[in-house]
Image (tube, rainbow, N blue to C red):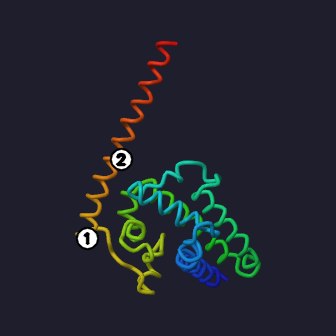
Amino acid sequence: MILFWCIQAVLGVLYAQLLEWVLHKYVLHGIGKEKGAPFSFHFHGHHRASRKQLFFDDHYKSSSWGWNPAGKEVYSLLGLAIIHLPVAFFLPVAWSAAVLGGIRYFVFHRKAHLDPQWCKQHIPWHYDHHMGPNPDLNWGVTTDLFDRLFGTREVYLGTEREKKETARRLKRFNKVSKKLENEEKQVRGDKKDDVCFA
């Protein structure tokens, strides 16, 4: 019986990782690439935010239950757990392992986009997916196992190209940040003047 549970656990983990790869490739970047399509929040919200903010995605700072890309990700994961619920009656350990794999996915994904340095150290393939030249590669988030197996793994982090592009992005990001900071100072300055003369 214990061997059967162990086999279920391994199958559940592998299934969760494969499902992560398949859904990312065919749903989020397939039908989700079209604006207004179901799941377009991923490509048009999450990817846009990540590119603009040097991999950081501030959607993950707000509530995980909001109607934003991070919240929609949580609702999608809950939907997947419910859809797979019949499996729990026949293979409860496999279902539990797959659900835990989904939770692990969200925790890793959230952590990666709130702490880009952590991502670079622990799941660099996900950084490559967002910041590399081809967002149609590196589909795995928690592992690059299936990317290596299916030939969709392409290393970007640490390459000469990445160093040049990161320097260019940093320069542009700093310029925009400085402009926004100056505009904010002007707005605050105007409000102080309004209060003084009121």
Label pair 1/2, CB-CB below 8 angstroms: no
**Disc number lying in front (1 or 2):** 2
What element does badge 1 sit on? loop
Front-most of residues 114 and 104: 114
- Residue depicted at x 58% and y 67%: 35
- Residue depicted at x 25% and y 70%: 159
Residue 60, position as x, y percentages in the image: 53, 53
Question: Which corner quadrant of the image does residue 168 belong to?
Answer: bottom left
Residue 30 vs 45, above or below: the answer is below
Q: How crowded is mark 2: few (under 14 residues within 10 Å), some or many (20 or more)?
A: few
Amino acid type for the residue under numbered disc 1? Thr
* Sequence order check, earlier mark of 1 and 2: 1
- Residue depicted at x 31% and y 47%: 175
Seen in the image, is 72 located left or right of residue 115? right
Residue 7, position as x, y percentages in the image: 60, 83
- Residue depicted at x 42% and y 70%: 129
**Alpha carbon distance from label 1 to label 2:** 26 Å
Seen in the image, is 62 located left or right of residue 191? right
Q: How many labels does the image show?
A: 2
Front-most of residues 157 and 93: 157
Check disc 1 and report the residue beneath it.
159
What element does badge 2 sit on? helix
Question: Which corner quadrant of the image does residue 69 belong to?
Answer: bottom right
Residue 139 vs 55, above or below: the answer is below
Check disc 2 and report the residue beneath it.
176
Amino acid type for the residue under numbered disc 2? Val
